[in-house]
């Protein structure tokens, strides 16, 4: 019988296929099907040539997508016929460095179960080795200097493989086959504990033992992680937590806590299925969870008698939620097991600075905070903070998108044409590079308010441009001329790149639309702190009719003065004064607690608000929350962004159904008169209504007001019934859930962001989408 006809195909694979065990998988799959050919990395991803019987080749293509390694993401698979050449065997060929870079880099990934078993197996040669990894886990984005993702292009280049590691690296059936960060105690990075002067206090296991001893003595230890340094203390020690808070200059903002396992997390917090999936996912983000009672009985590690574990008050003062994460590096696992109780793991920086990630810089900047440094000699190439998530409306929702998520791109609804750089906002900054339909939203940069953060921003842009071979031709930016991100864009414009100004709240809504694979038109509800409007005033409570390419302002919160400008952001009582003056037609009650607390400046602030002196008008929803928080919670000054609103949300009684009323004007654009909410708050408090009920009625009233505004917008827009919710105020779970439920009950389809933050961390994605959709990218 004649030999069956042979089929040979070229298979081009794009996506996350480098550094995730994809080539070994391809080789083993092809071999199991008795196919011939090769696979190699190239600048676009991976290139396969496969030859064999037609049925076997078809089976290969099917299983290529359905059985790919867990960390891989196949975006695109393109086949083309080739002449059959015969031959035998299937090999992994050297990487091809030619062509346009389209290869994607995997995010850093938590230690896998196989590596954990080896880590705690006394018979394994990597027993208790803090840098164990394989093709399914370990550092990726934070160690990559360039692509293709090969060892010479990572910070592991300086560690020559020993004979044993090289044998595993070259063995096709080994889990570490072509694992670029492969190492072991004989050839890999080494762990050290140093004092503030750089003197060694221990190495290897003794470094971990001494670190645990320091923590048990209420010490503060700087721990080098995947993307930078953390500061660690025992979570049960009020002495240590208070000292950390004092030295770090972080008065109230909660610290995150690392626990050894999901069982411990469940003892401390309410844990639903979504929260558990987030905690245990390979991305290992911080997960915001509702706290149980202050003290819980738990058994660390599931072994031995139960211990009483408490979280010290200074860890998350007055907060009903706790940021919890599981260990995601081998070092974390070793520390958690040795310490046997939860420990704070917060960013290694002075408040408002970027996280330290270089050894020398960390010792300089953290020397007055940390008593010792648990570090190692594997360099971190780019700083990356922990990601922050929570469960909202039954979905995983990202509040800060960074380690574990970046640099995986998001898919845009349409090709942007010419490559776009979107510079983001001032606070919670991220930038975004868009090319084709890929949007590379950066790791969390932070607030662009100092030189160090600005340098992190500019270095990050350079790194992304090099890593993904993007040469921006269009630069999108916020309208506010004083944002450092805008000034950076202006400099690029002066150098010849095309500039596109994108209104802040339009960017919020565009980001939500992209997150939900929509293009509009939709009714956009953008509630946040502040953003410069197209009329030059400060917006922040907006009802828009929006597509990706443009928007119309249909309505907004009625403007109110911000007495003292930025001072009113830091001191919410000023907003209370302005709203009270508006609510009571210039004659606010004089016997209110907030007025008595500030009687020395009350008249002056009212005079500023009335005259407009240093008091810009704003439609900001964030400032409305500030005003009500000062009235209900007594929150007169804030130590971190959003503090007043967070405390008001957490005070609100969940089972209260009562709601205040928000009148809406008949003007165009229409206005929601939030002063009525403020007056209702004052009257309820005067009648003796408890603060938790008042807080709930305020939330319910604002949610109902938004729904009514959307009804008005639906009428004005000819029946559009899709509503996109965006802006930092929608981090408020109670408001978001009440608003979305009310919209859906009224026949609307409510969209909320899940993959990118609804706060300013998502602005850059929206800017990039708008720039592309407006045609400036074509």
Image (cartoon, helix red, strand yellow):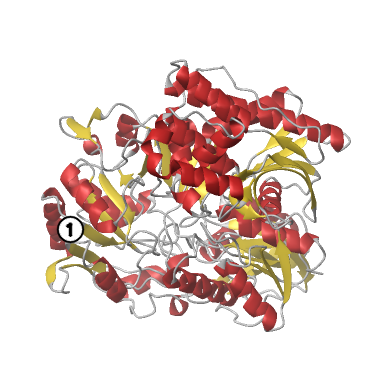
Q: Quadrant of the N terminus?
A: bottom right
Q: Quadrant of the C terminus?
A: bottom right
Q: Residue furthest right?
A: 718
Q: Horizontal and vertical percent for residue 434?
A: 68, 65
Element class at badge 1 = helix
Query: Quarter-wise, where is residue 595 in the image?
Result: top left
Residue topped by disc 1:
208
Judge from the rendering whether residue 639 lies leftward or rightward of residue 128; answer left or right.
right
Closer-to-camera residue (640/54): 640
Disc 1 crowd, CA 10 A, few/some/many (<14, 14-19, 20+): many
Judge from the rendering whether residue 233 lies leftward or rightward of residue 399; answer left or right.
left
**Residue 438 shows up from this direction:** yes
Closer-to-camera residue (305/470): 470
Q: Horizontal and vertical percent for residue 126?
A: 26, 61
Q: Residue at x 40, y 70 (%)?
A: 169
Please say if 480 is above or below 527.
below
Q: Residue at x 41, y 41 (%)?
A: 636
Q: Horizontal and vertical percent for residue 105?
A: 54, 66
Closer-to-camera residue (660/5): 660
Q: How many marks?
A: 1
Q: Residue at x 44, y 56 (%)?
A: 109
**Residue 415 shows up from this direction:** no
Please say if 91 is above or below 568.
below
Q: Residue at x 42, y 34 (%)?
A: 594
Closer-to-camera residue (243/377): 243
Judge from the rendering whether residue 666 lies leftward or rightward of residue 137; answer left or right.
right
Query: Quarter-wise, where is residue 408 in the image?
Result: bottom right
């Amino acid at each position: 019988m004649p030999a069956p006809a042979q089929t040979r195909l070229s298979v081009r694979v794009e996506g996350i296929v480098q550094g995730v065990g994809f080539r070994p998988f391809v080789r083993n799959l092809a071999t199991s099907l008795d196919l011939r050919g090769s696979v190699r990395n190239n600048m676009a991803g991976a290139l396969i040539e496969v030859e064999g019987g037609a049925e076997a080749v078809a089976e290969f293509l099917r299983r290529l997508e359905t059985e790919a390694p867990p960390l891989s993401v196949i975006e695109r698979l393109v086949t083309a016929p080739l002449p059959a050449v015969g031959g035998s065997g299937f090999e992994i060929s050297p990487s091809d460095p030619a062509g346009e870079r389209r290869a994607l880099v995997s995010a850093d990934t938590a230690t896998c179960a196989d590596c954990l078993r080896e880590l705690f197996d006394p018979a394994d040669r990597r027993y208790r080795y803090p840098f164990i990894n394989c093709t399914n886990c370990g550092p990726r984005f934070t160690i990559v200097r360039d692509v293709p993702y090969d060892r010479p292009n990572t910070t592991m280049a300086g560690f020559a493989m020993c004979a044993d590691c090289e044998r595993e690296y070259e063995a096709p059936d080994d889990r570490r086959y072509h694992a670029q960060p492969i190492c072991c105690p004989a050839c890999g990075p080494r762990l050290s504990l140093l004092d503030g002067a750089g003197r060694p206090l221990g190495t290897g296991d003794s470094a971990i033992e001494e670190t645990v001893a320091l923590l048990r003595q209420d010490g503060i230890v700087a721990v080098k992680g995947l993307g930078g340094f953390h500061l660690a203390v025992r979570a049960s020690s009020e002495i240590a937590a208070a000292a950390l808070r004092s030295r770090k200059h972080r008065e109230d903002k909660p610290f995150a806590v690392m626990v050894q396992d999901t069982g411990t997390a469940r003892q401390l917090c309410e844990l639903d299925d979504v929260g558990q999936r987030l905690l245990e996912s390979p991305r290992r983000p911080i997960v915001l969870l509702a706290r149980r009672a202050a003290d819980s009985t738990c058994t660390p590690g599931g072994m031995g008698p139960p211990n009483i574990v408490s979280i010290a008050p200074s860890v998350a003062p007055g907060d009903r939620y706790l940021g919890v994460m599981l260990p995601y590096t081998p070092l974390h696992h070793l520390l958690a097991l040795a310490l046997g109780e939860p420990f704070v793991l917060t960013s290694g920086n002075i408040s408002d600075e970027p996280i330290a990630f270089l050894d020398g810089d960390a010792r300089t900047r953290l020397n007055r905070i940390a008593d010792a440094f648990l570090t190692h000699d594997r360099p971190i190439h780019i700083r990356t903070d922990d990601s922050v998530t929570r469960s909202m409306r039954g979905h995983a929702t990202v509040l800060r998108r960074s380690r574990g998520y970046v640099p995986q791109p998001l898919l845009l609804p349409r090709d942007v044409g010419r490559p776009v750089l979107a510079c983001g906002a001032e606070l919670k900054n991220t930038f975004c590079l868009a090319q084709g339909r890929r949007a590379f939203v950066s790791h969390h940069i932070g607030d662009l308010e100092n030189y160090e953060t600005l340098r992190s921003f500019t270095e990050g842009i350079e790194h992304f441009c090099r890593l993904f071979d993007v040469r921006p031709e269009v630069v999108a930016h916020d309208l506010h001329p004083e944002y450092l991100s805008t000034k950076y864009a202006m400099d690029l414009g002066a150098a010849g790149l095309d500039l596109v100004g994108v209104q802040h709240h339009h960017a919020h809504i565009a980001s939500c639309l992209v997150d939900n694979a929509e293009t509009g038109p939709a009714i956009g509800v953008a509630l946040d702190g502040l953003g410069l409007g197209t009329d030059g005033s400060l917006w922040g409570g907006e009802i828009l009719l929006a597509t990706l390419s443009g928007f119309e302002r249909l309505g907004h919160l009625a403007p109110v003065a911000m007495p003292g400008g930025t001072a009113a952001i830091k001191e919410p009582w000023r907003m209370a004064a302005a709203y009270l003056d508006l609510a009571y037609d210039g004659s606010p009650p004089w016997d209110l607690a907030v007025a008595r607390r500030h009687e020395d400046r009350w008249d002056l602030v009212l005079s500023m608000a009335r005259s407009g002196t240093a008091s810009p008008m704003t439609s900001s929803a964030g400032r409305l929350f500030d005003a009500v928080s000062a009235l209900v919670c007594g929150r007169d000054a804030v130590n971190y962004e959003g503090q007043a609103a967070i405390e008001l949300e957490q005070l609100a009684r969940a089972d209260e159904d009562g709601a205040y009323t928000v009148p809406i004007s008949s003007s165009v654009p229409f206005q929601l008169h939030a002063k009525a909410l403020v007056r209702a708050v004052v009257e309820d408090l005067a009648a003796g209504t408890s603060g938790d009920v008042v807080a709930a009625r305020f939330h319910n009233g604002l949610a109902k007001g938004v729904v009514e505004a959307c009804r008005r917008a639906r009428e004005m827009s000819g029946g559009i019934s899709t509503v996109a919710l965006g802006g930092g105020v929608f981090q408020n779970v109670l408001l978001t859930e009440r608003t979305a439920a009310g919209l859906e009950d009224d026949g609307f389809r409510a969209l909320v962001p899940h993959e990118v933050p609804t706060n300013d961390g998502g602005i850059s994605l929206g800017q990039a989408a708008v720039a592309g959709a407006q045609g400036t990218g074509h």
